[in-house]
Amino acid sequence: MDQRPTPWLDDDQQRSWRALVMGTTLLFDRLDEDLRRAHDISLVEYEILVRLSERDGKMRMAHLADALAHSRSRVTHTVARMQKAGLVTRATSPDDGRGIIASLTPSGYALLTAVAPFHLDGVRDYLVDLASDEDFAALGRVMNAVSDHLIGCHPAMEIRQP
């Protein structure tokens, strides 16, 4: 294991890091608050509806959790609430009988189509329209690199020691 001291962030890096932390926290909180206030749905619930709609209305719960980068238990609890609201159903996979398939209901699809323009307005107002096309593209490249790196790190093998 490398024992060299970790270099501190310089002033510009520190400002950028803190801006990222503050900006993403405020952005996701605002998008969630807007959806809850206007449509009584959370940002996570909205994302579940989106992911299901992109996969012909059905996904294995494990794949849904991976697509959202959330724990399986968190997705299970959220989908259970959504099932009670009539937005999704859950059933055992007909392929192997082991996995659980979440499916979008007609009510869930109707809610998604009603909410999507509202959510898109928020995404544009709070992020996309504040950046140049070049800066937004750069942000996407950076966050894809972060995602690729973190997905490639196996949690059990990459435990960082203090």
Image (cartoon, rainbow, N blue to C red):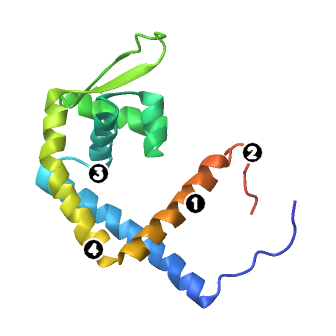
Whether residue 73 is visible here, answered yes or no, is no
Residue at the bottom extreme?
Answer: 11
Query: What type is the residue that disc 2 sits on?
Result: Met
Residue at 40 percent across and 37 percent down: it is: 75
State the CA–CA distance, disc 4 to disc 3. 20 Å
Whether residue 46 is visible here, answered yes or no, is yes
Q: Earlier in the sequence, mark 4 or mark 2?
A: 4
Percent from the top left, x then y, of residue 23? Answer: 39, 73
State the CA–CA distance, disc 1 to disc 4. 23 Å
Residue at 15 percent across and 56 percent down: it is: 37
Which class describes the residues within 10 Å of circle 2: few (<14), some (14-19), or many (20+)? few
Residue at the front extreme?
Answer: 134
State the CA–CA distance, disc 3 to disc 1. 24 Å
Depth check, mark 4 against mark 3: the one in front is 4
Depth check, mark 1 against mark 2: the one in front is 1
Depth check, mark 4 against mark 2: the one in front is 4
Q: Earlier in the sequence, mark 4 or mark 3?
A: 3
In the image, residue 88 sits, relative to residue 159, either above or below, namely above
Q: Read off the residue under disc 2.
A: 157
Q: Read off the residue under disc 3.
A: 43
Nearer to me, 37 or 19: 19
Q: Which mark is residue 129?
A: 4
Q: Earlier in the sequence, mark 2 or mark 3?
A: 3
State the CA–CA distance, disc 2 to disc 3. 31 Å
Nearer to me, 57 or 42: 57
Q: Read off the residue under disc 1.
A: 145
Q: Splitting the image into 4 quarters, where does residue 55 fall?
A: top left
Q: Earlier in the sequence, mark 1 or mark 2?
A: 1
Percent from the top left, x then y, of residue 118? Answer: 15, 57
